[in-house]
Image (cartoon, rainbow, N blue to C red):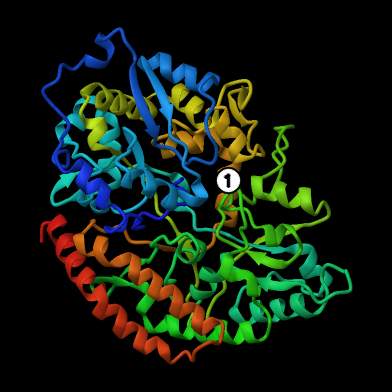
Amino acid sequence: MSKQMRTRFSVILATTVLVGVIAGCSKETTTAVDTKQPEATASASKEPVVMEWLAYNSFSEPDPDSKVVQMVSEKFNAKFKFWFVDSQKWNDNLNVKLAAGEMPDVMQVRSPVGTYVSNGVLAPIPDETIRKFAPNYAKLIDKYNLWNTVKYEGEIYGLPSLNVNGDYPTVLVWRQDWLTKVGITKTPETIQEFEDALVKIRNNDPDGNGKKDTYGFSDFALPAILGAFGSPGLTEVKSAAVQNKENLIYMEKDGKITFAAIQPEMKEALTLLSKWYKMDLIDPEMITSENTGGYGFDSQAFYNNRIGLTGKGMFYHWRNVIDPANPEDKGGGQYVNLKKSQPNAEIVLGKAPVGPKGASGTPQWGVNSTTLGITVKGAKDPRKVETFLKMIEASATDIEYYKTVFRGWKGEAWKEENGRFINLSASVPAAEFMKKGGQVFNIINVPEFDKSMDKFNYDFGDKVKPKGYLNMAVPSVESHVKYATNLTKLTVQTYFKIILGEASPDIFDDYVKTFKANGGDAIEKEVNEAYKKMLGK
């Protein structure tokens, strides 16, 4: 996930970019799933159904001959043509294909469904069809009350996926060996303690190379600093600043849904960050991000002794406690990558900083993960719809199938000893894991399954869990599709101008007025009206 890291309110398809899609699909925009087909259409046909597949986090291109892919193909009498869209350039690459009239049958939806509906990409999926072929999955979504996140004008246009990891806020990771080197014995907890530690990391040569070339932090930790003043305005910076994704945070205030980015407490946070930037505590390369390639949670700046504090990642990325019952365990993937670059490095997962008024927290995704959609192209063939829904149902009900599509092939990626599940692939790079079919078909996570399979990992997560700010899940509305991308750009530009000292923090007041006048008020009004309707008020 997804998703990934993955925000549920990203608007990635500008209307001007998708004129080609609208023209090419104008006759298909009302295509709906046919509910009158026989229940056994997928299994009744001898010929495999061929599905063009983009319902996965494409960190690498899956091997169609891998054991996992072959197992799924045989189980559902299907052949898969995998679409590969570089996850780091998802927006740009996918938009080009969609604008040319190309689309897969099933895809991840990394924006409000309304964006794709209005541009002729997604087909509606009747509730009765979902409950016919995936009844237990439907009950699971009922339990978490997530249908509102995939509805547009009253119809379902996507299938919510779950991720138990969304119950855990993102973590903050310090170089423990650096803290020790500069004389800090207590992991920082307050915003003042953070400042004291960052000053020493910048000035006291923690890497011992005799050069003043270390900084406190870069972009991954920014939301946690914002969170010391209130709900952070952005879930993370790189996707908004570099990848042109919308990731504004919704919050509830005074009984209404609004944007965290425009709250006065963000002005206070930006004022502090501007001060810290002038003190050289923030890496000046944060504008292009500490992640310069590869898996989105990798921090090359942290690996290369440039910064002493990073964030954004999850507890399992940075797990530095080794499972004594698993000889293959080397810790979380990003911890392993750090140790490859800096064998003597040690880390500690710290708490989110507490601000002057007691606020504290890092972004928390929530269990609602990346939406999956059936395109108007895929909906033309009822067999594809039925097969996809049955795949989801298998994940929701069959734990052995779930283990295979989630964790990989038994005996290679995981094993069981004395009734205990042992993950053998925790340290395997995401790209390599995916080539072998791991998580290519992991289209719905089941919280109970996940925790039962990985108790050691989740016990660790519970111990290091910081406070979090949950991004409120709201209905998809037309005004969000129309305005949110530009509002994100406005927010990032304003935030950066203040942090970098290019403008006074006082421009924040004008920014709020511009934000509200250029779509912010319209979105708030429509979202609140839609939310009330959803609640039956």
Q: Is residue 250 visible?
A: no
Residue 98 location in percent, x, y?
A: 33, 44
Q: In this view, does 129 lie above or below 144?
A: above
Q: Which of 62 and 155 is in front in this view?
A: 62
User: Where the C terminus falls, by quadrant?
Assistant: bottom left
Can you name the residue that lies furthest to the top here? 46
Q: Position of residue 176 (x, y in %)?
A: 75, 63
Residue 259 coordinates in the image, percent (x, y): 32, 72
What residue lies at 45% left-to-right and 27% top-to-bottom? 402
Q: Nearer the viewer, residue 101 or 521?
A: 101
Quick check: 132 left or right of 341? left
Residue 423 versus residue 224 in the image, above or below: above
Tell me the amino acid under the disc marked 1: Asp
**Residue 60 placement, left or right of 55:** right
Residue drawn at point x = 74 percent, y = 32 percent: 327
Residue named by callout 1: 459
Left or right of residue 173: residue 147: left
Nearer to the camera, 86 or 9: 86
Residue at 31% across, 10% down: 47
x, y (%) of residue 201?
Answer: 75, 75
Quarter where residue 352 is shown = bottom right
Which element is circle 1 on? helix
Q: Note whether residue 417 is visible.
A: yes
Q: Is residue 82 above or below residue 221?
A: above
